[in-house]
């Protein structure tokens, strides 16, 4: 028996409550790679898992954590050996497979990426799934939109995906407008490179018409719902939008006109089930030409701070990125 600590969520009398406890490595699921998790991070999906969202996690007790970075302890797959520094994000990690909020995970080798040179394990988790999603969004947007085409907009800008997207787009030379519902987000967003920070009413007050005055060459949308519909109408000719999230709703109204009269493109972003090689491409970019300084928006906690951070993700007061440091880091 080998003990490890985890932030474990229990369903008790219809309530979902997390607490730290000692677990046995032998009880982890089968998988080729056993990892000593040094760092994890918190994403909106972890808050959903921790609060009993059965679309994310079906069975409790459960250890959430869709992100993990650590060192290989055992590997039955020749691609990895003990001591290798690795990253695991997405697939089923933290959903119905014990996740990165435990000090140990055991996962299929097909989920594991070697941490690229140029990125340490903590930096990898400062980015985490939020960073990977922002990277995928920016890569998709740039298939159509270049800095010289005009300003771009980021919604949900004080969130994890939003802040990394703002920092990355600014680094790549875009003029970035950030939309945030938080009055205190303006200073950090400008520090990350936003040229302009607007309130949510900037989008909410756009009329619900098929075509609006084109305002942005591109949009990284992280909130979905009605705002996404309005933004499609306000995207310039040959422009593009990416959509990854649904905090503002799962459906939106739009019309065919932005697509057939302006050639607008809408990219769906999935960071979870895409091929491992695509994830590795994005990680490699962040280790090199996409290196962004996220220290001003990074909060660090141990397992004891997870409950509070999860509550702030759920009530919409969380901003930036929270990394979770495990004892062996
Ligand atoms: N498709 C994928 O693979 C993938 C991967 C990662 C995340 N996601 C999804 O992407 C979204 C963002 O993730 P995240 O980790 O950045 O979450 P997050 O840190 O919780 O940020 C979400 C942000 O959305 C804004 N927001 C919250 N409620 C809103 C509402 N009712 N209307 C408009 N804006 C609202 C807030 O920003 P402001 O206060 O600044 O407006 C909030 O900070 C989530 O829905 C998440 O599930 C998808």
Image (cartoon, rainbow, N blue to C red):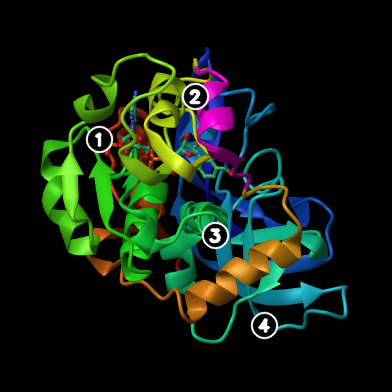
Mark seen at residue 84: 4
Asked if residue 255 lies in the magenta stretch, the reply is: yes
> Mark 4 or mark 3: which is in front?
3
Write down the residue under mark 3: 139
Mark seen at residue 16: 2
Q: Quadrant of the N terminus?
A: bottom right
Residue 264: % across, % down: 53, 38
Q: Are marks 3 and 2 in contact (CB under 8 Å)?
A: no
Tell me the quarter of the picture where residue 263 sits. top right
- Residue drawn at (71%, 45%), measured in percent from left and top? 92
Q: Is residue 36 visible?
A: no
Label 4, ligand 1: CB separation under 8 Å: no
Q: Quadrant of ligand 1?
A: top left
Mark seen at residue 258: none
Residue 7: % across, % down: 50, 46
Residue at the far front: name it.
261
> Mark 1 or mark 2: which is in front?
1
Write down the residue under mark 1: 317
Residue 236: % across, % down: 40, 40
Instruction: Mark 1 or mark 4: name the one nearer the start of the chain.
Output: 4
Label 1's element?
A: loop
37 w.r.t. 74: above or below:
above
Mark 2 → mark 4, Cα distance in angstroms: 35 Å
- Residue drawn at (28%, 27%), measured in percent from left and top? 203
Q: Which residues are magenta?
A: 254-270
Label 2's element?
A: strand
């Amino acid at each position: 028996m080998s003990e490890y600590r985890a932030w474990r969520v229990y369903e008790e009398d219809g309530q979902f409550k997390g607490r730290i406890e000692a677990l046995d490595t032998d009880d982890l699921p089968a998988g080729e790679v056993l990892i000593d998790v040094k760092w994890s991070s918190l994403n909106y999906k972890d808050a959903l898992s921790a609060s009993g969202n059965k679309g994310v996690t079906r069975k409790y007790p459960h250890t959430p954590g869709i992100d993990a970075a650590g060192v290989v302890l055992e590997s039955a797959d020749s691609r990895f050996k003990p001591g290798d520094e690795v990253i695991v994000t997405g697939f089923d990690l933290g959903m119905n497979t014990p996740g990165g909020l435990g000090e140990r995970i055991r996962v299929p080798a097909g989920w594991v990426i070697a941490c690229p040179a140029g990125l340490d394990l903590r930096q990898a988790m400062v980015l985490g799934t939020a960073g990977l999603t922002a990277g995928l969004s920016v890569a998709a947007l740039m298939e159509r939109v270049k800095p010289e085409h005009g300003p771009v907009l980021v919604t949900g800008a004080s969130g994890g995906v939003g802040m990394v997207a703002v920092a990355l787009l600014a680094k790549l030379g875009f003029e970035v407008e950030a939309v945030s519902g938080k009055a205190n987000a303006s200073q950090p967003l400008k520090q990350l490179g936003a040229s302009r920070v607007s309130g949510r009413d900037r989008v909410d007050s756009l009329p619900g018409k098929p075509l609006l005055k084109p305002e942005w060459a591109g949009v990284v949308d992280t909130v979905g719902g009605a705002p996404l519909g309005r933004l499609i109408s306000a995207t310039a000719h040959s422009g593009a939008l990416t959509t990854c999230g649904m905090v503002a709703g799962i459906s939106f109204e739009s019309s065919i006109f932005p697509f057939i009269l302006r050639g607008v493109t809408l990219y769906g972003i999935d960071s979870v089930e895409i091929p491992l090689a695509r994830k590795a491409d994005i990680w490699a970019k962040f280790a090199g030409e996409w290196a962004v300084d996220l220290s001003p928006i990074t909060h660090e906690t141990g397992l004891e701070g997870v409950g509070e951070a999860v509550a702030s993700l759920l009530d919409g007061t969380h901003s930036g990125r929270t990394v979770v440091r495990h004892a062996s880091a």
